[in-house]
Image (cartoon, rainbow, N blue to C red):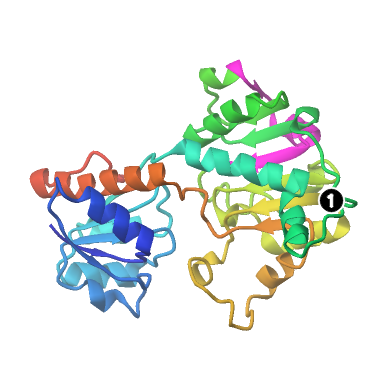
């Protein structure tokens, strides 16, 4: 199949080309993300491959349909960047990668906890300047903490399993408890979860119900000085309110790999630009905040899985007109 690949970075090209031999697709790579301004690049391609920050809204989909696109496959598990209703109206199939490597995201989540908890990022910067003073680098041990895992899908389950080796107390919250999780964690109700968790890590999908789930109303119920980790979806946090509670000390530590307005910033080198997003710039000034650029998935293992499943989605659609990983809701 002839496929246009948007938001393609060198690692995307490498993994997709490396895995394409058995499929034989004709891949054309475009570095820009998909938007109303770049949608013309996709004209004439029956297959469209996108990523998390591509703007696949109703207007874009209407243009795609008019110019021959029959399938949109996202190289991600999440698909909130795609207007599914518009795709259905235009008879365009939408597919995703349901799970590529839950362990990749899980390990990164734990890495963020350890980095902020032991201040290794600050120690690294000091050593680079030949400063080997350790005063001010006191940290904590995970075994002394109660960690709350919000969402126990594939990634949440792996986070719990990986955390279990540290000897910490683990609480879990999910509307649909999983029996396998109970081996390592205790499911509790929302108030207990909020009241007892020293560290809260978010692993739930973005839905109308979870949008800004941590906001002005919910954050006060958390422990004073709570440590929040978000490697899931940026919009789970209300950024303005998060900044307010960082300033008050209610939030003691914050580690985020996602940001609710990340589409205009992440995956780009803006080091020579003046910051234009005041909230993101403010977050980066806090000494107790760690921001990374939506890279929790970025391992060789995960990239290989993403490429194989994505290319397989196109092949299955080309062969049958359907796809086992299509999104039907």
125 vs 67, left or right, is right
- In percent of the image, x 16 and y 44: which residue is there? 316
323 vs 125, left or right, is left
Expressed as whole percent of the image width and height from the top left, the position of residue 34 reads 35, 70
Q: Quadrant of residue 240?
A: bottom right
Q: Is residue 82 at all visible to an observer of this figure?
A: no
Span highlighted in magenta in the image = 183-203
Q: Nearer the viewer, residue 154 or 89?
A: 154
Expressed as whole percent of the image width and height from the top left, the position of residue 95 reads 28, 49
Give the vertical position of 97 relative to 281 (above or below).
above
Q: Quadrant of residue 25?
A: bottom left
- In percent of the image, x 23 and y 38: which residue is there? 324
Q: Is residue 101 at all visible to an observer of this figure?
A: yes
Q: Secondary structure at mark 1?
A: loop
Q: Quadrant of residue 73?
A: bottom left
- In percent of the image, x 35 and y 80: which residue is there? 37
Give the vertical position of 223 relative to 241 (above or below).
above
Point out the residue furthest to the front here.
130
Q: Nearer the viewer, residue 11 or 51?
A: 11
Count of numbered circles on the image: 1
- In percent of the image, x 71 and y 66: which residue is there? 284
- Position of the N terminus by quadrant: bottom left
Q: Is residue 187 in the magenta section?
A: yes
| Residue designated by label 1 | 250
- Position of the C terminus by quadrant: top left
Q: Nearer the viewer, residue 24 or 49?
A: 24
Expressed as whole percent of the image width and height from the top left, the position of residue 31 reads 35, 71
209 vs 222, left or right, is left
């Amino acid at each position: 199949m002839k496929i246009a690949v948007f938001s393609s970075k060198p690692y995307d090209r490498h993994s997709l080309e490396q895995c394409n031999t058995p499929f034989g697709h004709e891949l054309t790579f475009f570095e820009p993300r998909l938007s109303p301004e770049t949608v013309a690049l996709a004209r004439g391609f029956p297959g469209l491959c996108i990523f998390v920050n591509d703007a696949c809204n109703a207007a874009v989909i209407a243009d795609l349909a008019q110019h021959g696109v029959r399938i949109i496959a996202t190289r991600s598990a999440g698909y909130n960047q795609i207007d599914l209703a518009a795709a259905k109206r235009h008879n365009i199939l939408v597919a995703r990668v349901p799970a590529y490597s839950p362990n990749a995201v899980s390990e990164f989540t734990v890495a963020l906890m350890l980095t902020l908890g032991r201040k290794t990022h600050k120690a690294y910067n000091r050593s680079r300047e030949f400063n080997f003073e350790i005063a001010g680098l006191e940290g904590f041990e995970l075994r002394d903490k109660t960690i709350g895992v919000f969402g126990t899908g594939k990634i949440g389950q792996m986070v719990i399993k990986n955390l279990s080796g540290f000897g910490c107390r683990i609480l879990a919250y999910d509307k649909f408890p999983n029996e396998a999780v109970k081996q390592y964690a205790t499911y509790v109700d929302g108030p207990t979860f909020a009241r007892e968790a020293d560290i809260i890590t978010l692993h739930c999908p973005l839905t109308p119900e979870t949008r800004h789930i941590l906001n002005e109303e919910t954050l006060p119920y958390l422990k004073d000085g709570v440590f929040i980790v978000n490697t899931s979806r940026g919009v789970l946090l209300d950024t303005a309110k998060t900044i307010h509670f960082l300033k008050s000390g209610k939030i003691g530590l914050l580690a985020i790999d996602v940001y609710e307005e990340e589409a205009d910033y992440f995956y780009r080198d803006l080091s020579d630009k003046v910051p234009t997003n005041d909230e993101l710039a403010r977050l980066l000034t806090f000494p107790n905040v760690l921001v990374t650029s939506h890279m929790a998935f970025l391992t060789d293992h995960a990239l290989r899985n993403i490429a194989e499943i994505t290319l397989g989605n196109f092949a299955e659609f080309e062969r049958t007109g359907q796809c086992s990983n299509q999104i039907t809701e």
